[in-house]
Amino acid sequence: MAIWRIRIACSILQARNTHSEYIIIIIIIINAFPLQQWLHECASVLHYTHTLHNTLHTTHYTLHNKQHTTHYTLHNTTHTTHYTTHNTHYTLHTTHNTLHTTQHTTQHITHNKLQTTHNTLHTTHYTTNYTQHTTHYTTHNTQHTIHNTLHTTQHTTHYT
């Protein structure tokens, strides 16, 4: 009897959504056993078939859910990675622009300060030179005037 159950189980496992195998199994069982034994075996086969059907249905449902879960996890991971990459790119771009602006502004301010310092030094130099020259010429002219006045006074005193 155990051999028939194994055969029946194997035949049921090979079934592909058709009822022909079940009919063949039932006919084989009818020819091999008396009616009471046949009914008992049929109940066993139907119970086994029902259990197998529920197991296959549960397995199918579990695999289907795992497939969907994997799909959505992959989709969400891909989307999150894309979003993170985009944000990182944007942050790097903003940082680059900030650094460029800071560098440009710093160079511009430094250049202006240097230009102002240069202009101040140039003006100071020019003013100092002008003052020195003016002082020199004024002193020279004053000395020359004094000399001429003395010379004229001596000349006048000498002839008078």
Image (cartoon, rainbow, N blue to C red):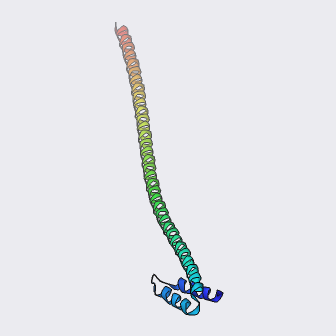
Residue 119 versus residue 132 in the image, above or below: below
Q: Residue 149 at x, y = what percent?
A: 36, 13
> Up-down: is 118 above or below 128?
below
In this rendered view, identify the residue nearer to me: 56 or 143: 56
Looking at the picture, does residue 49 appear above or below residue 96? below
Where, quadrant-wise, is the C terminus in this rendering?
top left
Q: Please tell me which residue lies in front, 135 or 75.
A: 75
Q: Is residue 26 above or below residue 80?
A: below
- Residue drawn at the location 42% of the way across and 39% of the way down: 109
| Residue 105 percent location from the top left of the image | 42, 42
Tell me the quarter of the image containing the N terminus.
bottom right
> In the picture provided, is 47 more to the left or to the right than 126?
right
Between 37 and 135, which is closer to the camera in this rendering?
A: 37
Task: Return the residue found at the far bottom.
Answer: 31
Picture coordinates of residue 114, whole percent (x, y): 44, 38
Q: How many numbered badges does the structure rendering display?
A: 0
* Residue 13 found in image quarter: bottom right
Query: Residue 19: image x %, image y %?
Result: 46, 84
In the current view of this chain or complex, which residue is farthest to the top?
Answer: 160
Closer-to-camera residue (52/102): 52
User: Which residue is located at x 48 percent, y 87 percent?
Assistant: 23
